[in-house]
Amino acid sequence: MVKVDGKMAMAVLPASRKVDFERLKAAARSDNVELAGEQAFRDMFPGCEVGAMPPFGNLYDMDVYVSRALAEDEEIAFNAGSHTELIQVAYKDFERLVKPKVARIAFGE
């Protein structure tokens, strides 16, 4: 979870990568992008464990930025609201449902 000019957004990238805030700032055309603290979003996702929210920010009126590395995969897997359950879907279906902004937002891309 990140804040883009003070508004909550999701940055979705492979677990093995780290967010490159300068790249995310450029992708968002923003002056200020920062990591959001748990207190800022813990109540925004009822029924989900903190840190296990599925990347459907569009359902919560927030932008979703997806790493180009994930967009090139056939499938995407993510937490299903808990740290013990996963959902795996075709990336093209995820993209169709969420309409994320795809960009190089991680180091090593």
Image (spheres, rainbow, N blue to C red):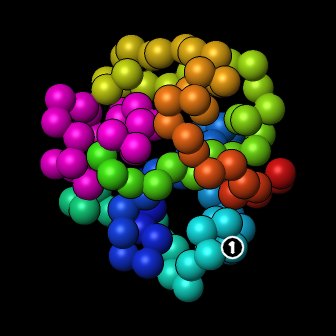
Viewport quadrant of the N terminus: bottom left
Q: Which three-letter amino acid code belongs to the residue tagged 1? A: Ala
Q: Is residue 7 visible?
A: yes
Counting other residues with Cα less than 10 Å from the Cα at mark 1, is it few (<14), some (14-19), or many (20 or more)? some
Q: In this view, does 97 lie to the left or right of 19?
A: left
Residue holding disc 1: 26
Where's residue 4, x and y in %? 46, 71
Q: In this view, does 86 lie to the left or right of 59?
A: right
Q: Which residue lies furthest to the bottom in this view?
A: 31
The residue shown at (50%, 36%) is 98
**Magenta stretch encompasses residue 43:** yes
Where's residue 62, x and y in %? 38, 54
Where's residue 52, x and y in %? 36, 33
Would you place residue 58 above or below residue 52 in this image? below
- Taking depth in this image into account, of 37 and 70 the one nearest to the observer is 70
Q: In this view, does 27 lie to the left or right of 52?
A: right
